[in-house]
Amino acid sequence: MKKQIRYIILVVSVFLVTSCGTSNSMHHQPDLTAYDKSLPTVKKQSNTVFYSGNNFLLKNKQNLWELYVEGDPLERGLMIGSLSDSLLKKQEYVFFDKINQIVPSNFKKQVLRNFLKWYNRKLYLNVANEYQSEIFGISRYAPKDLDYIAPNFLRDLYLHGAHDIGHAVQDLALVGCTSFAVWGDKSEDGSLILGRNFDFYAGDAFAKDKIVTFIKPKEGHPFMMVTWPGMIGVCSGMNMEGLTVTINAGKSKIPLVAKTPISILTREIIQYASTIDEAVEIAKSKKVFVSESIMVGSAKDNKAVLIEIAPDRLEVFEVNDGNELICSNHFQSEGLKNNERNLKQIKDSHSQYRFDRMTQLLDKSPKITPQIAVDILRNKDGLNDLPLGYGNEKAINQLLSHHGIVFKPAQLLVWVSANPYQMGEFVCYDLNTVFKYRKQNDSIVSLEDEKLNIAKDPFLETTQYKNYELFRIEDRKMDIFLENKKELPENFIANYQSLNPDYWVVYNKVGVYYYQKGEYALAQEQFNKALTKEITTLPQKEAIEKYLKKIKRKLQ
């Protein structure tokens, strides 16, 4: 179900792109008069190392791409586009190919295109010229054969609102990210430590080419972020002032017009703020169109807070007497926690469950270290260590994360997970080395601080992990069988359920299969098995109970 919802979010995002926009937005271009428009010349050192001047892109031994760029907005954009040219094109093709698979109907695309043409009419008015110019530079290298969707610049600009459009327009269930921060006597050395899982899933191919980007802008603070090709917004990042930002989606009301994308707001914060107060002031100056919790950590303040932002208000939540902060996907501030949508989110979703599980995991460790932080992000069990089945959204580690990340802001250290998910090696980067001590024309080698890397999860070597990856394949097959109401092959059910036996989904889907066939006693047995497992959300549990009521009537 979660994968389907995520795909729908992605679909809605792309339908934004298919909008031609109003006349003004369609013909809009950023003001580039102050910038040199010359295209950079890229040299190839090897198949995985490219450079232009002091800028470069390389793939490290953990298969993370590392991108380093400097300059003014247009210069940065052109460098990003030229260095990541093939990755950029590949990413857009992956994105739109997925959409074509999900919604092959041209009629449905046209209906949404017309609606979003109106909805999207003012997005360009809410993105600063600096970031439009950077996106414009990147768009020079975007695929030309996708112009039928929208011109390159507008298409790439609109894609930066994909996260927002998905849950704003459709008010869908949210990506289930979880984050935490500890400081004072809760961390090993008293300094701030933050960790988060970015549980955004848009297909395996989409997450394949993660980029750890380091930007030294002409104006503002140098910073790093974890992203994907073509994306300049910040989902997870830290600057040279020791300020960090991560985002967690909240339950949002449906606005009538697109405004500032959250990732662009957080980009401005990380580039221009050095303290929590400065971050809050930047957030207050913007109009957004979705609800979001922005966790801001600050080395200078040695604490973290949540900027809880909604289209109609902004609240700052902090723990006054504590030394840990937890964030999932619901608001905690006095001004927003009793909001009707927020209360429904807590009741219906898995946000509170993950919040409580994170509390348990932090309580188990009196002093948090980077290694313990990584172990927490990788935890796959439920409350009281209950087996949830692999891939359950109630887990901190849902085995679908785009990336996991850990920050130590006072030391300017950051650890970024390599694939798969947050299970691969956590690669360490020291921003002092990357920015402060970096010299012009230094040799092009990985920026990682290898001696501080954290080893991959031993779980990757287990039979359980191998079975989980097989389960994902069989689960997709199961969805196709259900959609087409086809007969399952012999022994399919036994094998399917054996691959992930603690996961309620394997019993629920088999129950639906038998129900479709009219074999109600077998369906009843499977649904009852599902109810013995930890079901992810209340609506999903209620859907099973509804099936059982129907079956009871049919068997009478």
Image (cartoon, grey):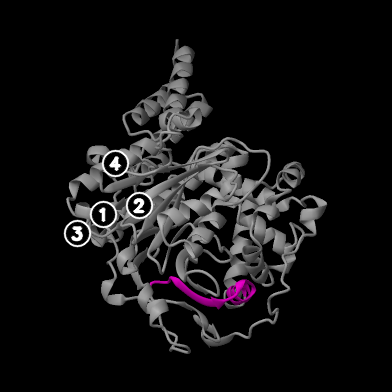
Q: Earlier in the sequence, mark 2 or mark 1?
A: 1
Q: Nearer the viewer, mark 4 or mark 1?
A: 1
Q: Which residues are magenta?
A: 62-81
The reply to whether residue 466 is in sight is: no
Q: Nearer the viewer, mark 3 or mark 4?
A: 3
Q: Nearer the viewer, mark 1 or mark 3?
A: 1
Vertical position of residue 124 compared to residue 392: above or below = below
Q: Which mark is residue 304?
A: 2
Q: Position of residue 98 (x, y in %)?
A: 60, 54
The answer to whether marks 3 and 4 mark residues whose Cβ atoms lie closer than 8 Å is no
The reply to whether residue 17 is in sight is: yes
Name the residue tied to disc 1: 183
Q: Residues within 10 Å of mark 2 (few under 14, many from 20)?
A: many
Residue drawn at point x = 33 percent, y = 61 percent: 299
Q: Earlier in the sequence, mark 1 or mark 3?
A: 1
Name the residue tied to disc 3: 188
Residue drawn at point x = 64 percent, y = 73 percent: 74
